[in-house]
Each structure stands twice: as C-alpha cells, then as structure tokens.
Amino acid sequence: MRRKIPSTAALIAFESAARHESFTKAAEELALTQSAVCRQIASLEEFLGLALFRRSRRGVKLSEAGLAYSRRIATQLDAVERDTLAVMGQQGAMAIELAVVPTFGTQWLLPRLKDFQRLHPEVTVHLTNRTRPFLFADTEFDAALYFGDADWSGTESHFLMHEYPLPVCSPALLEGRAHLDATRIASLPLLQQSTRRYAWRQWFGAQGLNVPRDLSGPRYELFSMLAQAAMHEMGVALIPPFLIERELAEGRLVVASPQSFHSDKAYYLIIPERKVESAALRAFRDWLLEQARDYRAESATA
C-alpha cells in the first residue's frame, strides 16, 4: 500500500519556512528561489488539505495547525538526519549506542573511555543520556549503564559498583564545624534526587533517626543539579563522592557527615539478550568490567 507521505522536498521547505517564519529566509537557507519555496509549501498544503501559514502583506505567520505540524516535522527530520549521518560515519567500523545515567557517564566513564579507544580503535562508542529504564525494542540502544536492581526483562546484567552517598553541602553551612550531626542535617533543607526518592529516609534510618520531613525538599533529576544547588547553599545533598571529586578537591563542596548507608541497588551494564554476541559489545563489556574491578579495589584500599 502506498504511504500517505508528502514529498521530502516539500517537508524540508516547510520546516525551514516555519522555523524562520519567512519564505525569503527559507529560500536563502535552501539555495532556492522564493517562488520555488512557495510552490513546495503550496503543494504540501494541498496534500494536507489545510493552510499551514496565514499570509498578509507583512509576511507569513504559522497557523495553529502549521505550528503543531512544524514541531512534529522538525523532530522527524532531525531523526532522519541523525540516522543518515550515523550510517555515513560507520563506513565498515563498529559502533555501540550506549544509554548512560548522565553524571555517572560524565564523571566516571568518560575519563576512562580514552583507554578503551586506545585498545579498540575500530569501535566507536556513542553516549546518550537516559535516567530511567526503557524498552530496548523501542530504541536503537545496544546497551545501557543503569543504576537499579538489574531486574530488566530480556537482558544480561553485569554488576559494576555500589554507590555510597554522603551528605555534602557548601562550606558556609558548616559554620566553622568539621561536620554536622544527623539531627542538625535534619533541620536543614534536604535536596532530593528524583531517581533516589527514599535516599534521605535510608540515610537517616542508618543513623537511627526517623525524620518526618525526609521526603521534603526541592527535587532534581541529576546529581550534577544537586551538586550545583548544594554549592549555592540551597541545602544538603546526598551524593556519591566519586561523582563530585573536583568539587570536593576545590572546596566548593564539603562532606557534612562521613556517615553513609548501603543500598541494594547498584550500577550495572545492561545488554539485551539479542545483542550479547556482538564482538564490539563483548570487547566493551570486558573492558568496562575490568575498569570497575580496578575502581572497587582502589576504593577499598583508599
């Protein structure tokens, strides 16, 4: 059955004209004449059976339908361009599309990734942020670096490390003290992490305290956001120290209490079962597990 899809040229002309709200600027961007852009958009409007622009002597403005359609088309054209560039860039090389939890990917994985590139120059690793679980079947991801319980259907999981978060804050909140006790921390604003909703409850529980407001406080999705909020004296945050080594070394953040707690959740490499035989993924898996073992050993002796 023939697909109900307008011409690509018309969609490209429309996306450019919608972005600029100008046929003239779209023509300049696409190296076309203004009349050619007008014809493409007119043919698209005829195909759709609706007006995408309101025309006047002062120019053109998107109609309500045109605005909604332009947003969808821009997203789809971006995806086509991204996929095209990916195919063009492979040229026989192997690539891994890896979903990563953002701060872990930035602070722990990226500083080590150069070593993998040195050992396996034939493999390119692409990183994309994902903070929550997803279905591999609905994405192009080959694997994921994930924090959780590894209960991910249809996948093979590899343990990397636990995280042992500590309360950290701006030095100003210590008010000259070396550390704060749990009761004092309970009186301060508690900065919450969206994917660790009960972290403060677990931390206070490990200290033998029941704090009614342990779920209260501003909530942020990324540890990097928590760190920024803590540095700006907005409260106390629970963050694994290995994710904020620079901030701690520079004194922009300090450990408010040396007490941590053990969580059953951990960082894992997750590989869908249909991908486990990939040579590129096997090489990355073996390298990553070795890096994680070395890190755990170093942390145990520190």
Image: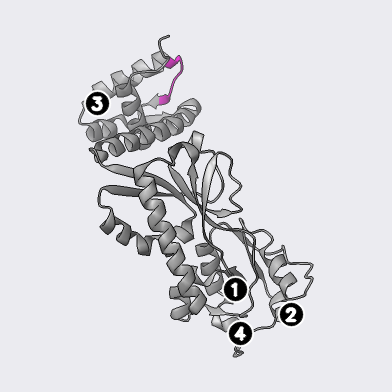
How packed mark 2 is, by other alpha carbons closer than 10 Å (few <14, some 14-19, many 20 or more), is few
* Vertical comparison of 36 with 215: above or below: above
Marks 1/4 in contact by CB < 8 Å: the verdict is no
Q: Which mark is in front, 4 or 2?
A: 2
Residue 183 badge: 2
Residue 90 located left or right of residue 232: left
- Cα distance between the residues tagged 4 and 2: 13 Å
Are there few (<14), some (14-19), or many (20+) residues within 10 Å of tag 1?
many
Q: Which residue is mark 4?
A: 174
**Residue 244 seen from this side:** no
85 left or right of 292?
Answer: left
Residue of label 3: 34
First of labels 1, 4 by sequence position? 1
Q: Nearer the viewer, residue 129 or 208?
A: 208
Q: List x then y, in percent, for residue 184.
A: 71, 81
Disc 1 versus disc 4: nearer the observer: 1
Q: Is residue 93 magenta?
A: no
**Left or right of 189 on screen, residue 2:** left
Q: Earlier in the sequence, mark 2 or mark 1?
A: 1
For mark 3, give the secondary structure: helix
Q: Nearer the viewer, mark 2 or mark 1?
A: 1
Q: Which of pointers 3 and 4 indicates the residue nearer the eye?
A: 4
Q: CA distance from mark 2 to mark 3?
A: 70 Å
Between marks 1 and 3 in the image, the one whose residue lies nearer the viewer: 1
Relative to 197, residue 97 above or below: above
The percent position of residue 247, horizontal first and vertical second, equals 46, 75
Label 3 to label 4, Cα distance in Å?
65 Å
In the rendered structure, which amino acid carries the disc numbered 1?
A: Leu
Image coloring type:
one colour
Q: Residue 166 bears which disc, if any?
A: 1
Bounds of the magenta segment: 48-54
